[in-house]
Image (tube, rainbow, N blue to C red):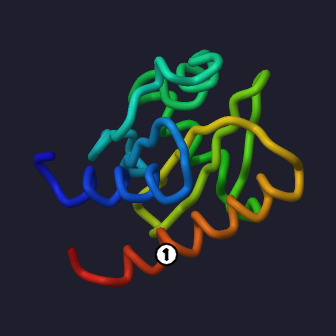
């Protein structure tokens, strides 16, 4: 891995048994990815949420004023969307389980990212 953000995402994927993660700036610049979107039941959700820089930027703008973290699903795939800082967003993809488990997982991921972003890399 060539950067600390990739290491951070990889560790979250391993700990929480997720398949793919992306960290980007609010402007849509991808800072790091980890895992593989091809291991998801469907990668369509990846394209819908973070297919290109403009899509990521629009997603970030849509989160303004929303309760976070957010979870979006398509088929068996779920995306946990967190804002660890005002200028960053993280999207972590995995397999849906139950509503309660997925909600609790989103909360844990958000807390972990918040803590990691308050600690210098």
Query: Which residue is located at x 69 percent, y 60 percent?
Result: 105
In percent of width and height, residue 73 lies at: 76, 33
Query: Which residue is located at x 87 percent, y 47 percent?
Result: 98
Is 64 situated above or below 60?
below
Query: Which residue is located at x 51 percent, y 28 percent?
Result: 55
Residue 75 is left or right of residue 78, and the answer is: right
Quadrant where the C terminus is found in the figure: bottom left
Q: How many marks?
A: 1
In percent of width and height, residue 3 lies at: 15, 53
Q: Residues within 10 Å of mark 1 (few under 14, many from 20)?
A: some
Residue 8 is left or right of residue 22, and the answer is: left
The residue tagged 1 is: 114
In percent of width and height, residue 67 lies at: 76, 64
Is 64 situated above or below 93?
below
Residue 120 is left or right of residue 85, and the answer is: left
Query: Which residue is located at x 49 percent, y 75 percent?
Result: 114
Residue situated in front as seen by the camera: 28 or 30: 30
For the residue labelled by badge 1, is the local secondary structure a helix, a strand or a loop? helix
Q: Report the residue that reaches farthest toward the left.
A: 2
In percent of width and height, residue 48 lies at: 61, 22
Is 80 situated above or below 104?
above
């Amino acid at each position: 891995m060539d950067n600390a953000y990739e290491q951070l995402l990889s560790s979250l994927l391993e700990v929480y048994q997720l398949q793919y993660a992306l960290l980007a700036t609010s402007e849509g610049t991808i800072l790091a990815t980890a895992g593989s979107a091809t291991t998801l039941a469907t990668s369509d959700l990846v394209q819908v949420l973070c297919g290109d820089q403009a899509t990521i930027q629009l997603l970030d703008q849509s989160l303004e004023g929303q309760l976070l973290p957010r979870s979006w699903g398509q088929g068996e795939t779920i995306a946990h969307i967190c804002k660890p800082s005002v200028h960053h967003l993280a999207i972590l993809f995995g397999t849906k389980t139950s509503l309660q488990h997925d909600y609790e997982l989103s909360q844990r991921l958000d807390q972990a990212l918040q803590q990691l972003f308050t600690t210098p890399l």
